[in-house]
Amino acid sequence: MESQVTASQVRRFGLFEVDLTQGRLTRKGAPVKLQEQPFLVLAMLLEHPGEIVTREALRHRLWPQGTHVDFDGSLNAVLKRLRAALGDDPDQPRFIETAPKRGYRFIAPVTVGTDEQHAPRASAASTPAPPETGTRELPGAIPPPAAVRRPGRGVAILLGILLVALGGSVALRWLGRGRTAGSAAAAMKPIPARKSIAVLGFQNTSGRQEDAWLSTALSQMLSTELAAGEKLRIVSGEDIANLRASSAWSQTDSLGQSTTSRIGAALGSDLLVLGSYAAVGKPGIRQLRLDARLQDARTGEILEETAEVGSDQNPFQIVHRVGGRMRDRLGVPALGDMDEPGILAALPSNAEAARFYAQGLMKLRQFDAVGAKEFFLQAVAVDPKFPLGHSMLAQAWGQLGYDQKCREEARKALDLSANLPRADKMLVEGAYYESLADPEKAVSTYRALLTMFPDSVEYGLRLVTMLDRVGRHEEALETIRQLHRLPPPAGDDARLDIWEAKQISYKNGPEAAMPLQRGMSKAAARGQKLVYADAKAGECAGLQYSDHPDAAIPACQEAYDIFLATGNRTRAASALRNLADRTSDQGRKEEALRLYDRAIQMLRETGSRWHLGAAENNMAIVLEAQGQLDRAEGLFRDVKRNFEEVGDKENVGTALDNIADIQMERGDLGTAAKTYEELISISVNPDQNGYPVYRLADLHLMEGSLQEAQHEAERAIKMFAAQGAGFVNWSEAKSVLGDILKQEGDLDGAQRQF
């Protein structure tokens, strides 16, 4: 009878179980042969899931001091054997991710210490690792950035738009390691919170469509006015728009207590502002009347009602008087001369720019990035020194996948941000560092922002998102715990529970189920359909990588239905692509092609070129597998054009890889050779892209050009070795070299390569 294993010595991930005491690895209960050194590496990675284990640490574990070995080559060989045992592909890792020049990280969810008989299913909150087919989900609220599928030797990863945030301060790292009794007691103190206020919007009582933009403009102006002085916390217009898209409320009447309490809980707001406006008179001399009321979100009580009239050429003066009345009612100090520069910097300088900016915000909040981009371009054309105009234009470009244009506008916004209120200035700064993928500075900025405004869930979740993307899950959890200590409704935000589940899932999937369910229940009860759909999209992706991948289909479908109903067609298309991926994996290829086609049509309508390229790539792979090479190549060429349009050179190379592979499949070796050579010539890092080089070696071998083939194979192997590249490509390059040497009669050399 086998000895009983204590819970803490058992680790599970995917279909595998590791008994750390007995040094045993099993897959679905069947033993998997693994030598001592690969097992030691696996154990060390499992001891620190989600964290980078350095190559130096592995050296000390595997080879005692004084042992003389070819360290790099030996460690690479150990990792090769471990990945082979797990069936893991370094180019599209499900379990072990390479951190170039640093070490390795175990990225799959790990379950600790449950007996085999009652082993749980993978948690829906788990961070998905790519499935065996190489699929990765498109960007969502919880899952990591997207990749595309490529079978066999054609594996090619599409990087996400913004790979951000490696940082984390000493303070939070220390907190993650443990606290003294005194610091723990201090951590339990409630965090002082300012009164929070949500400007829900103003109804256009005239009904004239040409005045519709004023609703957004007036709301934005009043939010800016009330935020000045930093005595009130303002709910973002984006959060308000998302809730309205999910669960609308009346804009013509006072809101009842049940409605105000639901909205307040959903937005984390104590106070609500809403009302109406009307512009009367002839153009150029019109008068604008603004009626506003302030309600207590918890009780529904109307605290203040006010009306102001003035020229429609200077609406901020009207808004300023309304804001002053509300400040008086709430006991908030009046604005001083020191506040004026910040307010002016945060608003467009003229009426025309204000109109374009408001129309851009409306489009962006309606998930129309193409329309938003056009209005923001007009706004910065008539007011080129308006920093937030450039910042929002950067956001629109980013959503469409134009990374370089996003960076350029984010830089302009930063350069113009000196006079902005400090919170707006730091948000602009953080967004700029995200656009550069400068993680240390982005995390540092958001951490400083949260330190200055510790009652802001919005700022806290920006930091959590950054920490999650780089695997600093303990620091992210500490931040979430800090935010949970805020008084309600802010500390009871459904997103905190969902993000908490996400972080817990990295070490213990079953424990993540409770906070996930709690967060989703809150979101459903409060009408936060988009928050709920985000969680469902994460569940959809997580289940695809579990022991029960077919359970992902209903979750994907539910996410798709909600995103489509609320108007977010880009996210709906992403969910549809996940459905297509799963359907294809089930062998239902024709149905999968229909789903891909629907997703592609939606993405063409939304103008999201980056996401379109990713969806087309996956569809092309299915077509290629069916032998429809002409259709597949046509789609891959569309993929190439999409990434050329957005300036994504790396993924242009991915498309060329795939096109050249199809040309080789057809036997068109001359054309394939030219395509591989084109890829090498345009590579972002030509000395690190060994894939087309070893494919050229294989091609020259097929042509019988052994000398050229050997040169390219040896060159590719050196490139793979220098960058610590994936085992699959490295081993295939070695195999090609072995075939070449065999044909040259060098059997000993060939055997060494094999």
Image (cartoon, rainbow, N blue to C red):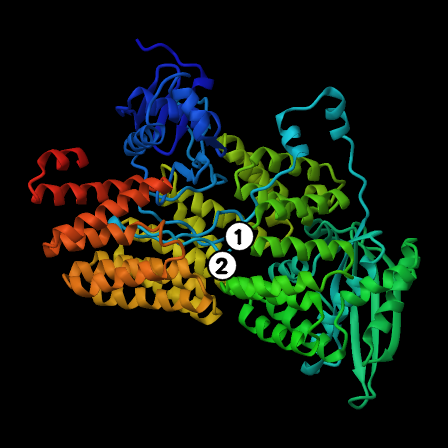
Question: In the figure, is residue 747 to the left or right of 689?
Answer: left
Q: How many marks?
A: 2
Give SS at disc 1: helix
User: Residue, x 26% and y 24% (percent of image)?
Assistant: 33
Residue at x 35%, y 45% (from the top left corner)? 91
Q: Quadrant of residue 475?
A: top right
Which mark lies nearer to you, 2 or 1?
2
Q: Which residue in the rendered view is the most extreme toward the bottom?
A: 282
Does the image show residue 46? no
Q: Amino acid at mark 1?
A: Ala
Task: State which quarter of the image contains the N terminus.
Answer: top left
Q: Residue 533: give its label.
A: 1
The structure residue drawn at horizontal position 70% and vertical position 36%, both measured from the top left corner, is 482
Q: Which mark is residue 716?
A: none
Labels 2 and 1 touching (C-beta < 8 A): yes
How far apart are labels 2 and 1 at the CA level?
A: 9 Å
Residue 571: image tag: 2
Q: Characterize the local packing of mark 1: few (<14), some (14-19) or many (20 or more) Cα atoms within 10 angstroms.
A: many
Front residue of 47/499: it is 47
Q: Inspect this view and state whether residue 432 appears.
A: yes
